[in-house]
Image (spheres, rainbow, N blue to C red):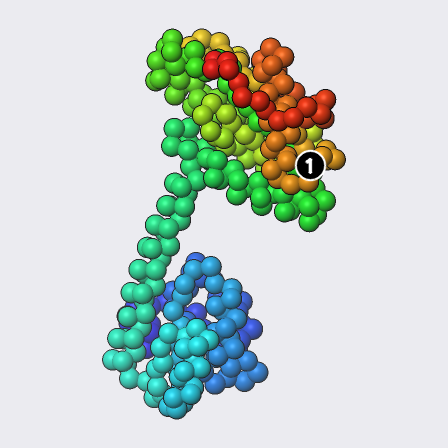
């Protein structure tokens, strides 16, 4: 009957086979008996709902006409009932309605994913923004703590960025930011993740990287950016300073402290003459970054 209506069907002759066949990226509708041996339709519906990443309507086929059975079906996640024996017309109407719901759901899910992507994207550079970094760092911190992995971050600040805007204009400043983002992305090794931290600051999160490996990455970015700006953009050769920290530092007890130590190292790099990468491990124990009077940082 379903094939006659133009639908492609996948038939499962038991709950185990059904679980193997189900894929919410390919399956748009589930029809199942409410009463089945071993695992009935109500239990199978609960299992399917727990596995779904995308909403798929579920229709029960049943000879049960009592109210309790229908209420139970709705409670476990069913969407509608078809009573046996099936009427071809009723089947076509109910299936058509459920597939419209599925289509609208997929459209809304796609829009939601796109909005979430845009909310985590820096519009100017095309890389992740501060919100995306905070989420990524929390996720990688949890994994590192759980499995005993290394985790490093590198915090970058473009040297003399205010002078670029003042001398060459904001368009040149925007291009410089985009140029650094491209350099950062091009230097990143999987699974490194890069983000715009804010203003002219950028950050890279490096799972499985200790402080030495994080320093090597930041130093490579520093050298490549200086070479790249020598031939790209209106502002001429530019430099960047960086600070790195890793979870292996005994002072690191939270994601926030990891960022703070990298920030201290970055401030030291700026204070020592810029165009260099400093390690948190070399910190002399001074406090966090002070308020700077030098607006041309």
> In this rendering, does residue 3 appear at all?
yes
Depth check: give the residue in front, 82 or 169.
169
Q: In the structure shown, which secondary structural element does the residue marked by tag 1 occupy?
A: loop
Q: Residue 35: where, in percent of width, then height?
A: 48, 85
The residue located at (60%, 33%) in the rendering is 259
Q: Residue 187: where, in percent of width, then height?
A: 56, 25
Q: Residue 134: where, in percent of width, then height?
A: 53, 40
The residue located at (37%, 51%) in the rendering is 112
Residue designated by label 1: 252
Is residue 31 rendered to the left or right of residue 12?
A: left
Seen in the picture, residue 244 relative to 226 is either above or below; the reply is below
Q: Residues within 10 Å of mark 1 (few under 14, many from 20)?
A: some
Q: For residue 90, what is the image quadrant?
A: bottom left
Seen in the picture, residue 26 relative to 59 is either above or below; the reply is above
Depth check: give the residue in front, 44 or 286.
286
The residue located at (64%, 34%) in the rendering is 258
Q: Outermost residue, right direction?
A: 250
> In this rendering, does residue 222 appear at all?
no
Depth check: give the residue in front, 70 or 59.
70
Is residue 91 rendered to the left or right of residue 133?
A: left
The residue located at (32%, 77%) in the rendering is 1
Q: Residue 227: where, in percent of width, then height?
A: 53, 12
């Amino acid at each position: 009957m379903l094939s006659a209506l133009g639908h492609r069907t996948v038939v499962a002759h038991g709950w185990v086979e059904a679980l193997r066949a189900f894929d919410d990226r390919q399956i748009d509708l589930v029809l199942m008996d409410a009463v089945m041996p071993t695992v009935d339709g109500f239990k199978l519906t609960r299992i399917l709902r727990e596995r779904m990443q995308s909403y798929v309507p579920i229709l029960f086929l049943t000879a049960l006409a009592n109210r309790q059975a229908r209420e139970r079906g709705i409670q476990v996640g069913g969407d509608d009932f078809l009573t046996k024996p099936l009427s071809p017309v009723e089947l076509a109407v109910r299936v058509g309605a459920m597939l419209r719901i599925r289509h609208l759901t997929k459209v809304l899910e796609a829009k939601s994913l796109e909005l979430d992507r845009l909310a985590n994207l820096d519009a100017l550079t095309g890389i992740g923004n501060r919100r995306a970094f905070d989420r990524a760092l929390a996720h990688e911190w949890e994994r590192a703590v759980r499995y005993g992995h290394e985790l490093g971050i590198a915090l970058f600040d473009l040297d003399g960025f205010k002078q670029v805007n003042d001398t060459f204009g904001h368009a040149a400043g925007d291009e410089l930011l985009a140029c650094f983002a491209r350099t950062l992305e091009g230097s990143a090794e999987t699974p490194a993740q890069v983000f715009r931290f804010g203003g002219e600051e950028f950050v890279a999160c490096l799972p499985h990287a200790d402080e030495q490996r994080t320093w090597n990455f930041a130093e490579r970015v520093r050298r490549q950016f200086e070479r790249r700006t020598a031939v790209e953009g209106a502002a001429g050769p530019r430099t960047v300073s960086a600070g790195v920290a890793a979870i292996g530092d005994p002072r690191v007890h939270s994601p926030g402290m990891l960022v703070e130590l990298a920030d201290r190292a970055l401030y030291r790099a700026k204070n020592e003459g810029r165009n260099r990468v400093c390690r948190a491990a070399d910190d002399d124990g001074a406090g966090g970054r002070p308020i700077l009077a030098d607006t041309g940082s």
